[in-house]
Amino acid sequence: MSSREKILERIRAAGRRPPALPEIDTFESRFEDPVGKFAEVLTSIGGELAEVSGFDGLRAFLDQKYGSWSRRVSSIPGLADWTDFDLQTADPHSLAEVNLAVIQGETGVAENAAIWVGEQQVPHRVLPFITQYLVIVLPKAGIVCNMHDALAKIGPVSEGWGAFIAGPSKTADIEQSLVIGAHGARGLTVVLT
Amino acid sequence: MHKAETDHATASIGFNRDEPYVDWHDETLWFVRVKRDRAARQLPEWENLRETASGIKDFVLAHMDSLLVQFEARALENGIKVHWAADADEHNRIVGDILESHGITRMVKSKSMLTEECHLNPYLASRGIEVVDTDLGERIVQLRQEPPSHIVLPAIHLKKQDIGELFHEHLGTEAGATDPQYLTEAARVHLREMFLTRRAALTGVNFAVAETGGFMVCTNEGNADMGVHLADVHIACMGFEKLIPAERHLGVFLRLLARSATGQPVTTYSSYFRKPRAGQEMHIVIVDNGRSAQLARPDFRNSLKCIRCGACMNTCPVYRRSGGHSYHHVVPGPIGSILAPNFDMRANADLPFASTLCGSCTNVCPVKIDIHYQLYQWRQTLAREGYVPAAKAAGIRAMNAVLSRPRFYQWGGKVGRSLMKLAPVLVNNSLNPWYHQREMPEPPGESFREWYLRNRSKK
């Protein structure tokens, strides 16, 4: 008998009870001001927040804050001429050089400041992690209250990969002291549009 | 397997030698518990969420076979290779064979308690394959050649001075440097080099979704994603109890996991893998290794609901004052103590006794496992099967003889009180384990029963 059959056989032999699958509602976590809640939580987990109006506003913000930076990339079509580093590489290892990545997010979650980023938004899965600093552009209309709302909005997930990203990478493995910038991005700025 | 060399009580004596250190360990973990409370209280539906999560896992335990088959079918459709491992040896062999077939001799690995349980690293080393653990805490204990002492905070038993010395020796940081920011930066540079040069990455699995064949991996550091997205081969290893039925259930568990573990509203990265990226090979290893036996024990099957948040450790008064290593099992603390006897009753017979049965673990568990009740149940089972030491068994029999006979109990109490008064040395000596850390109290003049009878008769 193969291990597959052996394991399934043992599980069946263990007997079963027939509980029903509980229904999940979206619970009571509703916020009168989801955008305000998102901003509050993002700041508390080490992220930075900016708000701009329109594409010109975004350009102006990026110029003002990151204009002097080198090795910046973006997967947002309108920003191609703002970048100085080619994302059209076959080998994701070359992205180790990237200082700043500006990417688009569609769905944000007020209760925990997570933003869903999938393969539609990034040409390489490693980009949001390997870049030293990350900027996610997020429409305010895309912010929902909680994770149930978020999964209802993005699901069923059709992409091969996606991630909820909440704040910059962090660790507290040395005496529980919080350090921002473990292995992923050292900083995350969310630009609301 | 054989009896553990040092049982929990003996190991705890060693841990308790340095009192300021134990106080620090205790307070540090309690602080994590306090953060968990704060996070939980922000959600009015917290108890409802726990109940829902527990109910979903009940459904999973009852339909494990069909859900596993569904998960396998979807994963295969998505281009993932699926392997089944009946035990630790088979799991290790499968991982070793995958790596060997690609001629890979160096691999990065993010946190996976399952691979600790299976002792994967030493096995791969014996096949000439080097594994680098990439979670900062796990890398620290790996360099120290010791196991993690906590499932979420692997290096919680260490002070920054210990880590400073370790990094000075292995990573070339400045002698005497202890700043966590500086030490973490050194590890970041060291591990980036690993991520960029390793062709295979292994991860654990937090949640595997039956209806989609996808699986989620959660980290704060980003180490799982850094490893996997740069590697040609991704191997994800999961105990079969990691299943959840549907994608929408991720919402329930993601809301509970990080809040219970560290008090964060969610982990920084919750990465959902459905298909390998172009040119990449993705494997899932589904592991039994005793889980089906636990599933067949009605008193203990609920332990398989565990989502490995570690909240029961942070809250446990015994864990906080005895340290993870005292438990001599891959998962320490209350949850580990109800999982361990299933693996080996003889070796782990002491662990269900490493508890006050206060019930705090049960109260914080996000999937409502009745942990303290199972600890109590394991004590019964272990005694019945003859795994309790003769002295403890004799003591329990003697207590039973006294406590079940009221007159004998009353007489014994009277004799005991007089003896303690006349010859305190009978209890204040090193043969009495209760005397080791405390002075015995003055014996009272009368028992409560005597007092009650006397005072009631006055009315």
Image (cartoon, coloured by chain):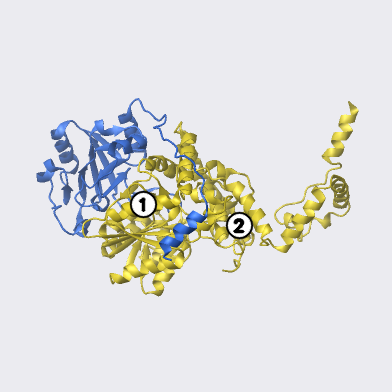
Q: Nearer the viewer, residue B386 or A188?
A: B386
Q: Position of residue B454 (x, y in %)?
A: 89, 34
**Which residue sits at x=28%, y=72%?**
B103
* Amino acid, disc 1: Phe
Q: Is residue B155 above or below residue A146?
A: below
Mark sitting earlier along the chain (2/1): 1
Colour of chain A as rendered = blue
How busy is the neighbourhood of tag 1: few (under 14 within 10 Å), some, or many (20 plus)? many
Q: Residue under mark 1: which chain is it in?
A: B
| Horizontal side of residue B31 vs B453, given as left or right | left
Q: Is residue B140 left or right of residue A163?
A: right
Asked whether residue A33 is in view, the answer is yes
Q: Colour of chain B?
A: yellow
Q: Position of residue B379 (x, y in %)?
A: 65, 54
Q: Is residue B202 above or below residue B361?
A: below
- Chain of residue at mark 2: B
Q: Is residue B206 visible?
A: no
Q: CA distance from mark 2 to mark 1?
A: 34 Å
- Residue B248: give x, y in percent of width and height: 36, 40
Lateral position of residue B85 relative to residue B34, left or right: left
Q: Quadrant of residue B346?
A: bottom right
- Locate the C terminus of chain B by quadrant: top right
Q: Which amino acid, by three-letter code, is at mark 2?
A: Leu
Residue B263 is drawn in which quadrant?
Answer: top left
Mark 2 or 1: the one toward you: 1
The relative height of residue B421 versus residue B120 in the rendered view (above or below) is: above
Q: Secondary structure at mark 2?
A: helix
Q: Which residue is mark 2?
A: B351
Taking the spot 49% from the left edge, 58% from the top edge, the residue there is A10
Q: Which mark is residue B71?
A: 1
In front: B119, or A33? B119
